[in-house]
């Protein structure tokens, strides 16, 4: 990245950071996830500096990118929650029991399913309120690798429901 490109991204970051954080906090309701989305936005800006420089409204480019990342984050979170709820319902139905309230320990409800690494990964992400960065740090891997593992876990658990 050239000095000019670096200055552009830095100026955009300084001008837009507070506004983007407020928007993300309001939309996502979680400071850590909001911070992740804002940082990912500027990571994409750094990776796409040529397009950003050529764009007639660089702040608009950053905001549209940011808004798309917020939507994606919210959808993933909602999908993860729904997936875990489906796991809970399926485990209860297979045992011939009623569906438990949120107060019941999911590990008890899921039985054998709770031993799957995919389940554990999603549970750590959704129930424990960890961010991708925190989860990655506890696993000793990069945030990008953690995102990929979450994606694979979602896909494996979705296939589990189809079977």
Image (cartoon, helix red, strand yellow):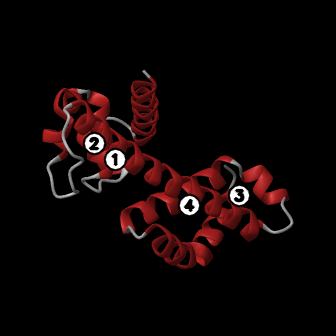
Mark 2 closeness class: few <14, some 14–19, many ≥20 residues within 10 Å: many
Give the mark count: 4
Mark 1 closeness class: few <14, some 14–19, many ≥20 residues within 10 Å: some
Residue at label 3? 5
Which quadrant of the rendered structure holds the C terminus?
A: top left
How far apart are the alpha carbons under marks 3 and 4? 25 Å
Residue 120 image position (x, y, % from top left) = 25, 36
How far apart are the alpha carbons under marks 4 and 1? 23 Å
Judged left or right of residue 68, residue 124 is: left
Which mark is on residue 70?
A: 4
- Residue 140 visible somewhere in the drawing: no
Residue at label 1? 85
Residue at label 2? 88
> Do labels 3 and 2 touch, CB within 8 Å?
no
Identified at 39% across, 42% down, the residue is 83
> Do labels 1 and 2 touch, CB within 8 Å?
yes
Q: In front of the other: label 3 or label 1?
A: 1
């Amino acid at each position: 990245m050239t000095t000019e490109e670096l200055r552009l991204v830095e100026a955009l970051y300084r001008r837009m950071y507070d506004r983007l954080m407020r928007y993300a906090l309001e939309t996502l309701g979680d400071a850590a996830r909001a911070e992740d989305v804002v940082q990912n936005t500027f990571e994409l800006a750094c990776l796409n500096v040529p397009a950003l420089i050529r764009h007639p409204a660089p702040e608009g480019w950053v905001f549209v990118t940011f808004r798309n990342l917020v939507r994606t984050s919210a959808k993933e979170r909602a999908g993860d929650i729904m997936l875990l709820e489906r796991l809970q319902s399926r485990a209860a139905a297979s045992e011939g029991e009623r569906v438990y309230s949120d107060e019941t320990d999911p590990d008890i409800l899921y039985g054998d399913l709770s031993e799957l690494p995919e389940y554990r990964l999603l549970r750590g992400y959704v129930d424990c309120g960890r961010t991708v960065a925190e989860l990655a740090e506890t696993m000793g891997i990069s945030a990008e690798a953690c995102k990929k593992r979450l994606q694979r876990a979602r896909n494996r658990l979705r296939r589990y429901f189809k079977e």
